[in-house]
């Protein structure tokens, strides 16, 4: 980032030297260029949130996105991804600025990206260090282009705490969705809002016959007019519904047994509105979910794949691109922890984590981290071959130590097998020798008997 004379004077020479010259990759540009207002939407947020289903979905999706912790890992050739003690963890997960918690900031980011299709936050820096994020409104962006049509300058104006501020793209954290958000579907939203207004008017002013009064005898004209006036003043209109009807002597209230067309129309309209809103927010088809037995865990996985993962990937890539220094981009990885959305029960956790440890994929301390247990002083991996334990301190000597252990183990097994074979052979020889001795003894006995017979003769 090139500094002008005033900025160098304010920051000082030493601090100005430590500020990294940032990559001047621009965010995606949409529209014909020049000056345009980012805050303009044909359908306002207030109109969108006036639809109860839309309000609930906005709260649910943005709240869930805000609950995901942002984790910065360091790529290690030997250890893989290692979680760092980066100072930005506090800004992204606890306190975005002294007056705003990170949950509320992330919820604002998710709401803007979901509904408007873009989000702008002012980045307060101290040298190369970020010290705060401040959401802004009423954003106006102006571009300047060269002869080839390439952007060479960008100025962003926005409102922060009722004050207009100005800066370039390096002063703001910017998220842009090329397809826009939910509010970009102005035609469908206008139709839904019109249908909702029509239904409200039908419920307020509409009427239908489902009951009638009957009298035992003939009523005079004056009595009938008095009854009509009294009935209209006491029982007509939706605001007087569910009142107790007091009938004069000789009158009877009868019910017409037929289907209410207005109620049927309202039910059909509610189903249609729910389907349209679900499609706008990228949710699975609600009718499909109702017809299929879907568990809570499967629904969480489905929502993660179709709704949350695209937003997570977008936010992760923009954090890496805009909030990391150029010298950090090759070694640091940013991820949103979505494990809270699809939690394992204790049995599944024991089976899954136990298998990962026994297969030598996770070390003991990595397993303890996932189980929220304290780390051990000596970290080790479980080797499936001959059930060998390898301490982490010996990783640098793994090729030697591992081969030695395995070779010694194999040699021991081979020696043991050889000893067993030798014992078996010895036993066989002893049996053969014993059998031969028995045969000799039998022959000697026979010879002795023959000798005695000869002497007797």
Image: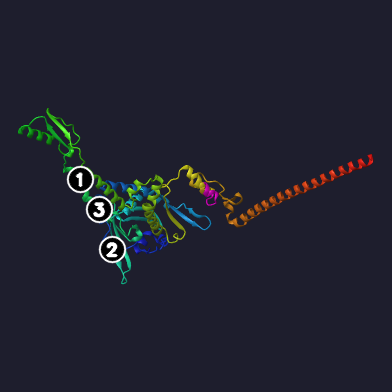
Which stretch did the figure color magenta?
A: 354-363
Q: How is the image coloured?
A: rainbow
Extreme residue toward the bottom, this view: 147
Q: Cα distance, mark 3 to mark 2?
A: 22 Å
Q: Quadrant of the C terminus?
A: top right
Q: Measured along the vertical axis of the image, is residue 441 above or below residue 254?
A: below
Q: The residue tagged with tag 3: helix, strand or loop?
A: helix
Q: Is residue 172 left or right of residue 210?
A: right
Q: Cα distance, mark 1 to mark 2?
A: 38 Å
* The image quarter in which residue 155 lies: bottom left
Residue in the foreground of this view, choosing between 430 and 453: 453
Q: The residue tagged with tag 1: helix, strand or loop?
A: helix
Q: Position of residue 437 (x, y in %)?
A: 82, 45
Q: The residue tagged with tag 2: helix, strand or loop?
A: loop
Q: Position of residue 450 (x, y in %)?
A: 90, 43
Residue in the foreground of this view, choosing between 109 and 184: 184
Q: Residue 189: which numbered mark, if any?
A: 3
**In the image, which is nearer the foreground, mark 3 or mark 2?**
3
Q: Measured along the vertical axis of the image, is residue 318 above or below residue 147?
A: above
Residue in the foreground of this view, choosing between 233 and 14: 233
Residue in the foreground of this view, choosing between 396 and 357: 357
Q: Position of residue 148 (x, y in %)?
A: 32, 71
Answer whether residue 143 is visible to the viewer in this image: yes
Closer to the N terminus: mark 3 or mark 2? 2
Q: Cα distance, mark 1 to mark 3?
A: 16 Å
Residue under label 2, please give it. Answer: 31
The residue positioned 71% from the left and 52% from the top of the image is 418
Q: Residue 200: which numbered mark, if any?
A: 1
Closer to the N terminus: mark 1 or mark 3? 3
Q: Is residue 214 magenta?
A: no
Answer whether residue 104 is visible to the viewer in this image: no
């Amino acid at each position: 980032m090139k500094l002008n004379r005033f900025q160098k004077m304010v920051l000082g020479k030493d601090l100005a030297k430590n500020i990294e010259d940032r990559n001047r990759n621009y965010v995606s540009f949409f529209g014909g260029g020049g000056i345009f207002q980012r805050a303009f939407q044909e359908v306002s947020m207030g109109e969108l949130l006036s639809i109860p289903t839309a309000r609930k979905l906005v709260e649910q999706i943005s709240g869930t996105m805000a609950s995901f912790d942002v984790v910065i890992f360091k790529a290690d050739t030997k250890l893989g991804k290692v979680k760092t003690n980066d100072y930005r963890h506090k800004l992204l997960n606890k306190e975005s600025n002294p007056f705003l918690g990170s949950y509320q900031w992330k919820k604002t980011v998710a709401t803007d990206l979901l509904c408007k299709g873009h989000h702008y936050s002012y980045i307060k820096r101290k040298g190369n260090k970020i010290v705060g994020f401040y959401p802004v409104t009423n954003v106006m962006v102006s571009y300047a282009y060269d002869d080839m049509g390439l952007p060479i300058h960008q100025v962003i104006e926005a409102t922060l705490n009722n004050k207009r501020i100005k800066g370039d793209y390096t002063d703001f954290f910017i998220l842009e969705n090329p397809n826009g958000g939910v509010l970009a579907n102005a035609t469908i939203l206008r139709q839904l809002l019109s249908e909702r207004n029509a239904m409200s008017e039908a419920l307020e002013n509409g009427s239908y016959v489902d009951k009638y009064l009957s009298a035992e005898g003939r009523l005079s004209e004056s009595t009938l007019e008095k009854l009509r006036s009294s009935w209209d003043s006491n029982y007509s209109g939706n605001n007087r519904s569910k009142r107790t009807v007091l009938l004069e002597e000789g009158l009877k209230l009868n019910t017409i047994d037929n289907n209410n067309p207005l109620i049927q129309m309202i039910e059909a309209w509610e189903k249609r509105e729910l389907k349209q809103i679900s499609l706008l927010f990228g949710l699975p088809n609600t009718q499909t979910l109702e017809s299929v037995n879907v568990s809570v865990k499967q629904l969480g996985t489905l929502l993660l794949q179709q709704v949350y993962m695209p937003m997570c990937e977008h936010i992760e890539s923009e954090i890496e691109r805009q909030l990391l220094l150029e010298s950090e981009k090759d070694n640091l990885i940013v991820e949103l922890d979505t494990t809270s959305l699809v939690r394992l029960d204790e049995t599944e956790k024991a089976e899954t984590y136990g298998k990962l440890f026994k297969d030598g994929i996770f070390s003991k301390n990595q397993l303890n981290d996932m189980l929220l247990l304290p780390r051990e002083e000596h970290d080790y991996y479980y080797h499936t071959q001959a059930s060998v334990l390898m301490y982490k301190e010996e990783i640098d000597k793994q090729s030697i130590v591992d081969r030695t252990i395995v070779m010694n183990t194999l040699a021991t097994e081979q020696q043991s097998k050889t000893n067993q074979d030798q014992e078996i052979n010895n036993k066989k020889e002893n049996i053969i020798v014993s059998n031969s001795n028995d045969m000799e003894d039998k022959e000697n006995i026979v010879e002795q008997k023959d000798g005695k017979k000869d002497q007797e003769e």
